Amino acid sequence: MGQAKDKAELSSLSAQSKLMPSGAKKSGTVMVVGGGIAGVQAALDLTELGYYVYLVEKSAAIGGAMAQLDKTFPTNDCSL
Amino acid sequence: MRPRYIDADKCTACGLCTKYCPRHLVDQYNEGLAVTRPIHIDYAQAVPATYFIDPEACLYLKHGTCQICVCTCQSKAIDFSQKAEEKELQIGAVIMAPGFGRIPDATLAKYSYGAHPDVMTSLEFERLLCASGPFEGEVKCLSDRRHPKKIAFIQCVGSRDLGCNNGYCSSVCCMYAIKEAMVAKEHDPEVEITIYYMDMRTQGKGFDAAQKKAESMGIKFVRAKVADVMPWDKNLKLTYSTMDGKHSFEPFDIVVLSVGLDAPADAKNLGEIAGFALNEYDFCKTETFAPLLTTRPGVMVAGAFQGPKDIPESVTQSSAAAGIAAGLIAKDRGKALVHKTYPKEQKTGKDEEVRIGVFVCHCGINIGSVVDVPAVELYTEGMEGVVYHAQSLYSCSQDAQEVLKAKIKEHNLNRVVIAACSPRTHEPLFQETLKDAGLNRCLFEMVNIRDHCSWVHANEPAAATQKSKDLVRMGIAKARHIQPLPEQTVPVTPKALVLGGGVAGLTAALTLAEQGFQTTVVEKEAILGGHLQHLSFTLQGDTVSTVLGNLTDTVKKNKKIEVLTNTELTQVNGFVGNFSSVLTTTKGKKATETTLDHGVIIIATGGREHRPEVVLGNPVKYSDTILTQRELEQRLSGKGKNLAPKSVVMVQCAGSRGDDLNYCSKVCCNHAVKNALKIKSLDPASQVVVLYRDMRTYGFAEDAYREAREKGVVFIPYTMDNKPTFKTSGKKTSVTFYDPILRDEVTMAPEVLALSVGIVAEGTEDISKLLKVPVNEDKFFLEAHVKLRPVELPVSGVYVCGLAHSPKPVEEIIVQAQAAAAKAAIPLCKGFVSVEPTISCVDKEACIGCGLCESLCPYQSIRIIKDENGKRKAETITASCKGCGICASHCPVFAISMGGFTDEQINAQITAFGAQ
Amino acid sequence: MSQKDFNPKILGFLCNWCCYAAADSAGVSRYQYPPNLRTIRVMCTGRLDPAFVLRGFAEGADAIFSGG
């Protein structure tokens, strides 16, 4: 997770957010909405692929539902 | 951005503030089963590892009083002046991954949820099972803390239920119920567990095997609908009805509701903000052949918001979405990245004087309150090589890094030992500081006197201090022998090889080409398209031939993609970044060989239809009247009249799930429903009977299953103890089966008997030998990590997607192919593979070329080569070595050393262990 | 010597990925265990050369623990 933290920012999405079409040049950045396992994985892969990522999570920590799980099916590995 | 009221740079996650916070707060992380405080962290491993204040519960933020936490915090991290901020960002693409929502409590009320504390959701039960949960992993009834003797699981709560407008199947509940039941049984083998279900949908790779294991552990599975759950004396009374119409009831101590996944609560809001459409259940609307694109260009979706799904599928979708996003803005790759620069590294020669600096950390009171830190620091005085020693309150804090840098310069240190917490979490931070100070990052050793000492010997301060001294002495002994290690990188040939020209291979090639990488697709047949050529329409109504035609055209037109048909891979050499393959093209009787250099390989070789000759004990001869589902589909989409047979019996799991193949082929239930619906649309009077074991129309396909029943398709379950029998006489075939509702044997003589035959792997064993990648017992490729690395294989630089991985429907194949391409693009776009310095290294002088290491290496990362004198010598393949050290520990002549874990270093630690 | 007085010196080799991580979690959860163990971190217990075990005994260990 270390690598993503260098390049990704963590912030919360406010209720008034709007996604506006922008005339400005695309800047090599991607926004990922949601910091669960899906969002985190997408952010990690994008930084590895050479893009700056804004990882947006509304709660205080990333991890989402998976962080609440004790073990995972079917191997019963620890999920944290 | 909302404030957390705590400065993340200063917070050390010591937890003192939570101890002093006077107010209680229901712990949402523990599903309300425990209490926490307004200032808290959800769990110890949370990222960021910074506490936060819940503004709705904090006495100061709500009522302007208290502020006790401010003075308890030793690192002065609490900052009530933080305000919410708004930011405007320029972005090239968006990935929506908001996850899933909760099934509303009202849906759970009929099972006495909320009315009786021992009725709980599966997530609450999960927390009960967890060692970090409210009862530290002990399973107790919430009502009176007694240990339960009988536990029931009710499946499909809030799923497959039009009553709460969730017509879909949540796709994960059968699996987690089995998991939780098994874990509960491990906690207490005496506990009796019953799972009440409609269909066990364990269709994923290896999932059926887990269910069998659960059965062998004594967990009962009962096919029944649960009517209600009522309090009954101290227990709960669960009333259920079975297939034969019988009603029964049974007492339980705990009833667990296997709640489904709802759409996220703010889905509508998100859809409006970002301007994309939702489906009828408020999940994101997508298409079969573009599963991750929302209706708004540039906005992708991944995870449970795309449709209920498990962890590996979410992870796969995320990588795939990342790959698509990367393709959309490929021109801007690297433009926004921030690169860090370091000062030039000073040379630390072998013969140079060892100058060790030792820093002993208090970690606030975490270490200091148990271990006598000043005594430990003093203990290092005068030890060989130690020229400087100091204490720090928080050695990980930002200002401590500055001190560390200054001391390295001031005392000309060339080894640093930090006695603090775990290298697993903090080594990268200190190594970064070493790099900033111009030292090689390997000239560092960490001693764990917190996690392994103060925290676990809290009541024995003297013994903990002694242990800290011993560990520090051992750490210093190792540090004397540490040598700088070079940062190693291996260049990458920025080209990809894709094996297989089916939908998986073509999609993977296209995803790579869109990111700008030259890709070669190898197909052994004369034409592209693979398995998909045999399909005509999808459950969602797409015409397959049009889509496939477009896909092959796009691939053929793409200048970055080279397509080689009639070609097979015959030889592979090399390793990640530097493969060299021999491709053999056969034209008529002439075979030509070409050599291709490439950096990565994607395996998309597909599978094929299984054609068992014996189905459920009945010999089968395929004909015009005994067809596979694929053949039936071809007939139904033909041009003639009277396409629909007047009567059809479909037999599910024909050859699968223990009949002939051990696994579930995942696609056959959908295939049967698809064909049944097609028949009904062609001729509503046609009679269709489906004999099944579990209908596995997971996800939104459940809607089609329901529609089929509504249209009069008859679904009748059978068991392996009472299988259907076929009898062929002349052209007629009759099928006899047991009908549990009539409670009698029924015989039918349908016009067509359609067998749902499943999918088998094809050619995977040959490729497994060529590439040295493993296959599982069912001959599908075995991924590197089932949950978290689902498209990577254990050999670096080799990826898998499609039917070669496991049977799956086309939308999952597309996602998996995009994910494999995204993962494969990582080394290609970096242009190099970086290698941790802690890998093996062979002393060529000492090596006797015995080859023991080569045969033992689990990652095929050491090989025997001939040196210039023609002698056999071992050589580490640095790009794929994982640093486990098996080679070093087995080398009979000690010719292999492990970076950072040399014999010399470990022996020094052992000697220091003895020297008290 | 009674059981109570026996205070063995144990030398442990812990795999970075599992047992060392587990020892970290034990700390995070504040599990209390006897302070007799001294540990050496390795990247995998596959690194464990039998010679290390023998040397450990020679240096006075009463027991060697290998966690991986």
Image (cartoon, coloured by chain):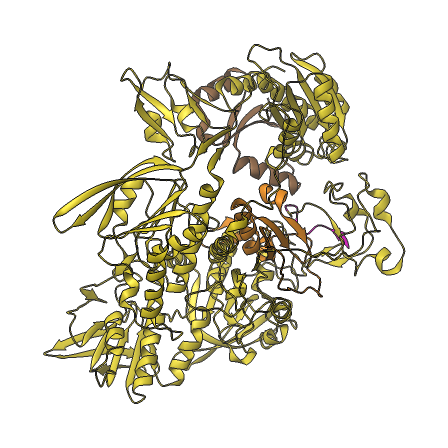
Q: Residue B283, image x and y in percent?
A: 54, 70
Q: Residue B805, image x and y in percent?
A: 35, 53
Foreground: B369 or B549?
B549
Q: Does the magenta stretch include residue B42?
A: yes
Answer with the quarter of the image where residue B650 lies: bottom left
Foreground: B65 or B25?
B65
**What predominant SS class does the magenta segment belong to?**
loop
Answer with the quarter of the image where residue B640 lies: bottom left
Foreground: A56 or B377?
A56
Foreground: B96 or B467?
B96
Q: In this view, does B719 lie to the left or right of B788?
A: left
Q: Disc count in the image?
A: 0
Q: In this view, does B904 lie to the left or right of B623?
A: right
Q: Residue C58, image x and y in percent?
A: 51, 15
The answer to whether one can see residue B310 in this image is yes
Q: In this view, does B95 lie to the left or right of B720?
A: right
The chain displayed orange equals: A
Residue B766 vertical position relative to residue B371 in the rendered view, above or below = below
- In the rendered picture, chain C carries what hue? brown
Answer with the quarter of the image where residue B549 lies: bottom left
Residue found at the far left of this picture: B730
Which residue appears at 47% of the width and 51% of the height? B787
The chain displayed yellow equals: B
Q: Residue C24, image x and y in percent?
A: 61, 37
Q: Does the magenta stretch include residue C56?
A: no
The answer to whether one can see residue B782 in this image is no
Residue found at the far bottom of this picture: B685
- The residue segment tinted magenta is B38-45
Q: Quadrant of the N terminus of chain A?
A: top right
